[in-house]
Image (cartoon, helix red, strand yellow):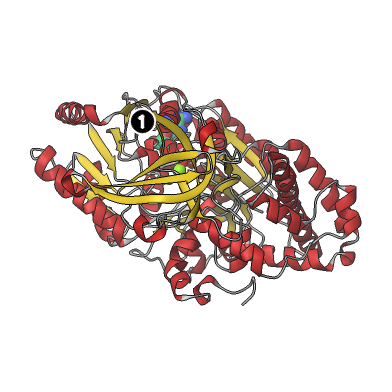
Amino acid sequence: MDLQTPVSQVSKSYKMFARRLEKLGIYKLEDFIFHIPFRYEDYSLISKINLVQPGEIITIKGKVEDFTNVYTRRFKTLQKAKISDDTGTIELMWFNQPYLKNVIKVGDLISVSGKIEQDKNILKIISPNYEIIFNNQTIHTGRLVPIYPETRGISSKWIRRQVFKILEEKSKTEDFFPDDFIKVNNLIGLNDALNKIHFPNNPEDARKARERLAFDELFDIQLSSLIRKKSWEKEKIKKPWQTKKFDKEIENFINKLPFELTPSQKSAFNDILKDLSFQKAMNRLLEGDVGSGKTIVGGFAAYLAFLNGFQSTFMAPTEILANQHFSTLTSILSPLGMKIEIATGSKNTSKNEFDLLIGTHALAYKKVEFSKLGLVIIDEQQRFGVEQRGTIKQKGENPHLLTMTATPIPRTVALTMYGDLDLSILTDMPKGRKAIKTWLVPPAKRNGAYEWIEKQVKDGDQVFIVCPFIEESESMVTVKAATKEFERLKKEIFPKLKLGLMHGKLKAQEKEKILKDFKDKKIDILISTPVVEVGIDVENATIMLIEEAERFGLAQLHQLRGRVGRGNKQSYCLLFTQSKNPQTLERLKSLETIYSGALLAELDLKLRGPGQIYGTNQHGVPQLKVASFSDFDLIEKTKNQAEKVMSKIDKYPKLLEKIKIINLKQISPD
Ligand code: ADP
Ligand code: MG
């Protein structure tokens, strides 16, 4: 067994956890040591019992004198223990963890960490971290204790134990940089960094470790980008088509739109016009909050392709979105003489007589023949891999590429990281769009909220209800939970209203039918799982209710609430939570006042740690675990170093090997 051993082959219990570990990006043993803590709990102050003060956060080491399970009413239990050292005795208490009796035994030498509370005259620690002292060493107490990104059933404590074992037992990780490189850049060695990031002796250790790992992370992205760029330069590619002058047609296109373009839509139009007049294929990323109006920018590009005699394809992540684009773009483009077709799982096209083919991302693998594909538009690019992108591009001869995303990537980042990518950002919202009024609803106001919703529905509004976020990808567990909630709402809360249920396990046709019913107002309230269909456009839907909002990231919540507020009516977002944690409530409350996806994403980064900002499982933007996209100095420094290394890359075989593996796995927007 070594660091490359897949977790499923380590042991039976590991095998059971394998699927959950995948969610954390852990596939093999080595991935544990690259699973980076996002903060530490400071339990480094070790105290004698007679010196502790109420309110202090400390660690105590002592002998277990007594342990009892106390049964309270309603089958709940309390665990009470007493421990002593040579200066005194202190009480410990846990709730509903009867199995502790098998872990903590009278006579054991134990280390506990937590906050000292005073109850009358007795000092105690409630729900302390604990561990039996072994080899005079502690992992979960008595030190800076790492806190990791967790997932259901996988706690920080469990991860910590695995990481500790692996670091102790398994072979070392080879450094990718030679010693002189490490010295020149004032870094610490990789092994040193990995040990210290998990188990630092002091904050300075952790800082140094972080610095080294952040350097590696950014450096790798930069070097991969350079290597990719070099390999393209070798490829001989055909010159792309260039647009002729169509001033009149463009003016006509803009005048016929059912709305006035926002200033940033106008400038995105201009960016595209410029791109299409160069001798280099367009590779533009269009970034804009949900509802900022990206679709029409794609429609404009497709119209230009058409004027120049080329076909376009527009790919959306789901059938529902593809259908929505089809109807929106048909109404705008077909009066201008364009022929638009749709190819989804349920509807296929074999004919080749279209100017614009709309479909899902699966189009990349379909046997659609294009006679003259000149433009590829990819909606929600973060869900679309580099491989698919290559495949679809091959269906034309060096077609232009326009990708769209609602993921906020800071401009500086995009430009530094991807030399070859151009960026347009839609910074303003269409006129008349009102900010979605957002309220955090405490449990006591739940029934009031339901009553208010019923009243709004009677006044003609429609509602989305999003069920709790249970697992990252939609599983039967999520579907069951949504179904249960649907039944409950139908029976107990809204028996007089028409409810619909939508989840990812429905067949495409069923989904379409439900969505159509919702659009046709045959459904008042649509209950859905969180992962389903982000971008659907139902102008009359004005209320979004999100259950267990605390389970979502801020940027995610912002995307969800973007399903409403698509028309001119005032829209509302109700965030339900049972949480009483003041930090959580504070975090959620920020949605009441902040309406920018980019700002919320940054706040997520600050509050929840890196790795959360771009959500999970999103391709296109590299996930940073340690570094931050706002660390411009380090971005600049690693860029310079990567360029230097690139000029004599043969001298860095280990590095080259690593980057090769990254490039195989990683998906990037260029
Ligand atoms: P995105 O894809 O960026 O989330 P869409 O392109 O779906 O947003 O646009 C959302 C809604 O706003 C659509 O109904 C669209 O017709 C409308 N829209 C787009 N641009 C404008 C504009 N400039 N003024 C008014 N409405 C607009
Ligand atoms: Mg969209």
- Identify which amino acid the numbered label 1 is placed on: Gly
- Closer to us: 307 or 562: 562
Residue that mark 1 sits on:
565
Quarter of the image where the C terminus is located: bottom right
Q: Position of residue 494 (x, y in %)?
A: 12, 38
Name above or below for residue 231 compared with residue 312.
below
Task: Tell whether 536 sits left or right of 641.
Answer: left
Name above or below for residue 661 compared with residue 519.
below
Q: Position of residue 421 (x, y in %)?
A: 69, 47
Kindly give the residue lying farthest to the front in the view shown. 86
The answer to whether one can see residue 542 in this image is yes
Q: Secondary structure at mark 1?
A: loop
Task: Tell whether 213 sits left or right of 234.
Answer: left
Q: Is mark 1 within 8 Å of ligand 1?
A: no
> Around disc 1, counting alpha carbons within 10 Å, would you say few (fewer than 14), some (14 to 19), or many (20 or more)?
many
Task: Tell whether 322 sits left or right of 273.
Answer: left
Residue under the image location 63 percent in, 59 percent down: 33
Residue under the image location 65 percent in, 47 percent down: 626
- Closer to us: 562 or 439: 439
The answer to whether one can see residue 386 in this image is no
Task: Tell whether 1 sits left or right of 660.
Answer: left
Q: Position of residue 269 (x, y in %)?
A: 59, 36
- Closer to us: 93 or 281: 93
Quarter of the image where the N terminus is located: bottom right
| Ligand 2 image position (quadrant) | top left
